[in-house]
Amino acid sequence: MPASDDHLIHLRDGRRLSYATFGDPAGAVVINAHGGLACRLDVASAHEAASAAGIRLISPDRPGVGRSDPHPGRTILDWAADVDEMLDQLDVGRFAAMGWSMGGQYAAALGFALPARVTRVAIVAGALPLDEPGVFAQLPFMDRAYTRLSQRAPWIARACFRSMSLAARVAPNVNGRLAARELGPADGSVIRAEGFAAFSAMMHEGLRQPRGVVEEYRAWMRPWGFRPEDLVVPVDVWAGTEDELVDREWPSELARRIPGAALHRCPGGHLVAHSHYPEIFERLNHGRQC
């Protein structure tokens, strides 16, 4: 993993927001919305591709994740307001957004809430709104289990996340091997190539606040506050043809419902972005030329 600077800013309500930066410090800004059970470090491996593309990749921890202070009861649009305030402090005007897995809905929220600032959005291995009929039942078993535990028995969910964090810290190689095996061949190859230690370090950091991870699972079940049909900024939907965690119909359904969205199905699993960062960044940069 390339060296990255970790930063903290203070929001108007007193909360601290943590973020990391990768890529070209003078480049065009892309905001990353990290995945679930992850944190600001989930795009560390994109450093070289972002540098080559002339992109300054800013990756914030959501509230209660990594080193960001919690914000109980938060919504997706609350996070968009946090990013808006962060970028004002960083003197950033327009930007593109990308979000992987659970982060897909947060990237979409930036496009909806800040259309005057957002040039383009990339949703990578993202989900449909989980409060819509039948969608939650299409999630993998473990995501459904963590969500229901977070809603109904948060003390059990916290214990699960605490145990996962401990395993990632004390046995990073074993933890990485288990993850590579459980996620399937395509994703396993990505984890092995990038290193078990790097994967486990990112996971440990993402789980450092078990209460915040519980809130992550509660928040993603709350209504988005908008529909996919309400997006007016250009959107690309990216999907791995070997993704074992996302329902195969979700990417095409998202692309159908978002006006003018482009669908990209690429070789890869749930970690499809790791093999296609150059193409994703090229499309995000394209939005600045339109």
Image (spheres, helix red, strand yellow):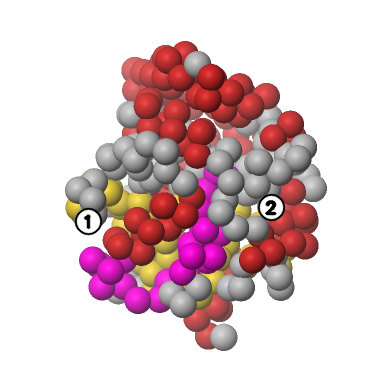
**What is the magenta range?**
87-114
Q: Is residue 282 left or right of residue 38?
A: right
Q: Which mark is residue 275?
A: none
**Quick check: is 253 in the magenta stretch?**
no
Residue 84 can be seen, yes or no: yes
How many residues crowd mark 2 within 10 Å: few (<14), some (14–19), many (20+)? many
Disc number for residue 239: 2
Q: Which mark is residue 12?
A: 1
In this picture, is 192 found above or below 29?
A: above
Determine the residue positioned at 58% across, 23% down. 148
Where on the picture, by quarter, is residue 199?
top left
Q: Is residue 100 magenta?
A: yes
- What x and y, as percent, mark residue 118? 48, 72
Q: Secondary structure at mark 1?
A: loop
* Image point (32%, 38%), residue name: 70
| Mark 2 element type | strand
